[in-house]
Image (spheres, rainbow, N blue to C red):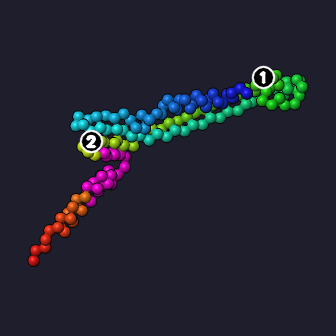
Amino acid sequence: MADHPIEGLMKTAMESIKEMVDVNTIVGDPVETPDGSVIIPVSRVAAGFAAGGGEFEATGGGQQEQQGQGGGQQGQQGGNGSALPFGGGSGAGVSVQPVGFLVVGQGQIRLLPVDGNAVVDRIIDVAPNLLSQMQNMFKRERKQPECH
């Protein structure tokens, strides 16, 4: 059985999407700063795809031709033995949104978001160091002898 025309439409659209979206679209090329830190852009990619079509019979003498050549239905073929005409289309869309930047350097890895609440993000970044300092402070208080 020969390939259906819609398969060609779908294949072309999917190949185009494949060319547009690759891993470098999501995790960008790293950039090194003068202080030795490395900045890596991170993006969110969303893609949508649709295809459709239909076979139709030519208006005008189509019914008459079928009946004139033996009557009955010809299945996927028109009245003259040729394939029915096909009309169809396909489309795709890709959305790329920056999410943030991974900053690797000075013994740390940090995610700097593009949007969002900067104060909350900063608190989350600082929280581990703050907890560590508080634990050290309480340990020192326990080790010091009490004076009367």
Residue 50, numbered label: none
Q: Is residue 117 magenta?
A: yes
Q: Is residue 61 left or right of residue 127?
A: right
Question: Alpha-carbon neighbours of circle 1 within 10 Å: few (<14), some, or many (≥20)?
Answer: few
Say what secondary structure mark 1 lies in: loop
Question: Alpha-carbon neighbours of circle 2 within 10 Å: few (<14), some, or many (≥20)?
Answer: some
Q: Position of residue 20 (x, y in %)?
A: 48, 31
Q: Is residue 94 above or below residue 1?
A: below
Comparing labels 2 and 1, the label whose residue is closer to the camera: 2
Q: Quadrant of residue 109?
A: top left
- Residue picked out by circle 1: 82
Q: Residue furthest left?
A: 148
Q: Position of residue 22 (x, y in %)?
A: 46, 33
Q: Residue at x 57, y 30 (%)?
A: 13
Q: Residue at x 29, y 56 (%)?
A: 127
- Residue picked out by circle 2: 105
Q: Looking at the image, is mark 2 or mark 1 earlier in the sequence? A: 1
Say what secondary structure mark 2 lies in: strand
- Of 69 and 59, the residue lying toward us: 69
Q: Main secondary structure of the magenta part?
A: helix
Under mark 2, the amino acid is Gly
Residue 59 visible? The answer is: no
Q: Position of residue 147 (x, y in %)?
A: 10, 74
Under mark 1, the amino acid is Ser
Q: Residue at x 80, y 31 (%)?
A: 75
Q: Is residue 78 left or right of residue 7?
A: right
Q: Position of residue 90 (x, y in %)?
A: 60, 32
User: Magenta part of the protein: which range?
Assistant: 109-131
Q: Residue furthest bottom?
A: 148
Q: Residue at x 74, y 30 (%)?
A: 56
The quadrant of the image that shows the C terminus is: bottom left
Q: Is residue 76 magenta?
A: no
